[in-house]
Image: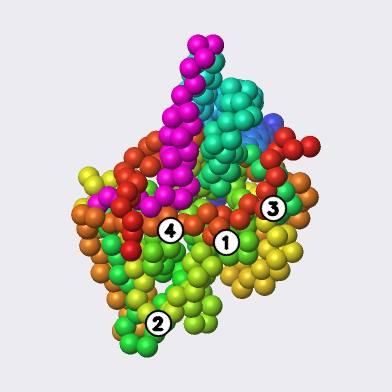
């Protein structure tokens, strides 16, 4: 009887120890959940701010387009048709702006989507499963080599002063942080660019195991690529460039 | 009495087991709650900050354009149009577009491979991109001005830049105009990059690279009819 009683005592003690452990762990997890609730509130707040900023951006861009057209119309209004020299300068300015990537453009092209490996695990997957600045630069170069005339990455126009580089887990383009998926829009000879992409060994390899980078493209007629978004910074972008006045031999 | 004792003993165990079961169930439920990682929040907050900064820049751009329109309206009302404004704007745009030769102090890099090895286009891209990141405002490779649609692609024998081929077994000269105050630190960064490239190669195929600051660096213009300036496939958006 004493033996049975002792056995029961030991069993109860063991059960109590286990339940104490589980209760303590449960308490810790409940606290963590409370922290997560705070995190979710912060995330919701940040997401709301981002949506507001995106709406504000659309409004600013629309205003800019209207004013840009207004200025162009105004110049054509003040310059008389017979002032051919001035009209030529104005047309030449428009052409230079187009070459520099400062106008919205439209044409047949491709939309490429690149993304990290789905469910990337930093402990299991190779680093190549993540999209880096060099992957994007490589693609831009490949497209340029195949006749691309206008390129944007996540709707940021690639111009002469564009810098594309990694900061931590994100990539910067035109001083703007970008997160995957990266959408590259390109206007150029569609068929030639398509053939080049299909034949590219680097991206073929990256799509295979173990990298499994997600990559796809679509051919789009009348694709619109937006102008460089901050022409106001051009003065800074060319701050140290002095025009060469003497002839270069 | 015996039955009472038994109920008393096993009743306690039963209650404890029930509590244990509830605690276990609760724990499983808690661990299933999808937890956002702090990394996600930081990334999102960084995006918000970056977006807000860019919006501020865009607002400044709009304000400056508005002033330009107002000034032109005033000039028009006075009958006093300054064509100089368009000329200045055109000069500025031509510099930005790479249509004007430019000069200043800068960095000159000579790079090639030791022995009979051919240089890889990825090395040139790495250096050019690093110069871009370091704030270079104009870059040339073998006197070909680098613009947004400049390609740097290797064929078996050549590297093609702006549609022109350069033999891969010869040296390449990269020139860059960069903020004079940042040239010294830029050279240190480039030396580090050079070392990391050299570490990847074996002793027989080494990158030979020299980096120097120069007082006068000239970056030529790109001709308007260059292949990289072709815009025949681009139509204005309001052209419908």
Q: Say if labels 4 and 1 share a chain.
A: yes
Cβ atoms under marks 2 and 1 closer than 8 Å: no
**Magenta segment, which residues?**
B77-105
Identify residue for label 3: B233
Q: Residues within 10 Å of mark 4 (few under 14, many from 20)?
A: many
Left or right of B101 in this view: B234: right
User: Which residue, given by chain and number where applicable, does mark 4 sit on?
Assistant: B145
Q: CB atoms at circles 4 and 1 under 8 Å apart?
A: no
Question: In the figure, A30 relative to B104: above or below?
Answer: above
Q: What chain letter is assigned to the residue under label 3?
A: B
Instruction: State the scheme by which the image is colored.
Output: rainbow
The disc placed on residue A71 is none
Question: Label 1: which residue?
Answer: B227
Of A92 and A13, the residue lying toward us: A92
- Examine the rendered structure and indicate whether residue A143 appears above or below residue A15: below
Q: Mark 1 vs mark 3: which is more N-terminal?
A: 1
Label 1 chain ID: B
In which image quadrant can residue B237 be found? top right
Question: Which chain's residue wears label 2?
Answer: B
C-alpha distance separating marks 2 and 1: 25 Å
């Amino acid at each position: 009887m004493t033996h049975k009683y002792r056995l029961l005592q030991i069993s109860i003690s063991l059960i109590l120890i286990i339940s104490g452990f589980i209760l303590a762990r449960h308490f810790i997890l409940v606290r963590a959940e409370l922290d997560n609730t705070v995190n979710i509130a912060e995330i919701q707040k940040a997401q709301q701010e981002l949506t507001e900023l995106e709406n504000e951006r659309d409004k600013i861009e629309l205003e800019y387009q209207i004013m840009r057209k207004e200025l162009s119309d105004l110049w054509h209004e003040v310059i008389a048709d017979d002032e051919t020299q001035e009209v030529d300068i104005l047309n030449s300015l428009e052409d230079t702006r187009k070459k520099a990537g400062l106008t919205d453009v439209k044409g047949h092209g491709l939309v490429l989507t690149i993304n990290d490996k789905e469910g990337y695990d930093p402990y299991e997957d190779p680093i190549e499963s993540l999209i880096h600045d060099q992957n994007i630069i490589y693609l831009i170069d490949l497209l340029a080599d195949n006749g691309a005339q206008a390129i944007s990455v996540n709707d940021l126009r690639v111009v002469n002063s564009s810098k594309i580089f990694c900061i931590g887990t994100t990539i910067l383009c035109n001083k703007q942080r970008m997160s995957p998926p990266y959408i590259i829009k390109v206007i150029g000879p569609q068929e030639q660019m398509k053939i080049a992409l299909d034949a590219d060994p680097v991206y073929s390899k990256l799509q295979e195991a173990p990298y499994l980078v997600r990559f796809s493209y679509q051919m789009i007629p009348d694709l619109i690529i937006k102008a460089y978004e901050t022409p106001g910074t051009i003065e800074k972008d060319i701050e140290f460039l002095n025009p060469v006045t003497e002839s270069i031999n | 009495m015996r039955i009472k004792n038994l109920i008393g003993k096993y009743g306690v165990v039963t209650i404890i087991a029930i509590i244990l079961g509830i605690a276990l169930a609760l724990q499983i439920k808690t661990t299933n709650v999808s937890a956002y990682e702090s990394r996600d929040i930081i990334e999102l907050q960084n995006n918000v900050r970056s977006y807000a900064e860019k919006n501020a820049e865009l607002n400044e751009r709009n304000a400056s354009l508005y002033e330009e329109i107002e000034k032109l309206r005033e000039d028009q009302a006075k009958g006093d149009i300054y064509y100089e404004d368009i000329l200045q704007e055109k000069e500025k745009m031509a510099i930005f577009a790479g249509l004007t030769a430019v000069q200043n102090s800068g960095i000159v890099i000579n790079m090639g491979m030791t022995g009979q090895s051919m240089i890889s286009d990825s090395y040139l891209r790495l250096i050019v991109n690093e110069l871009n990141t370091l704030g270079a405002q104009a870059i040339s490779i073998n006197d070909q001005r680098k613009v947004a649609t400049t390609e740097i692609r290797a064929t078996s024998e050549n590297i093609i830049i702006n549609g022109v081929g350069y033999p891969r077994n010869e040296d390449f000269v990269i020139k860059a105009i960069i903020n004079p105050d940042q040239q010294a630190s830029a050279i240190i960064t480039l030396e580090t990059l050079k070392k990391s490239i050299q570490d990847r190669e074996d002793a027989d195929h080494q990158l030979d690279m020299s980096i120097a600051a120069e007082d006068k660096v000239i970056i030529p213009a790109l001709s308007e009819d260059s292949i990289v300036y072709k815009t025949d496939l681009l139509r204005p958006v309001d052209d419908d």
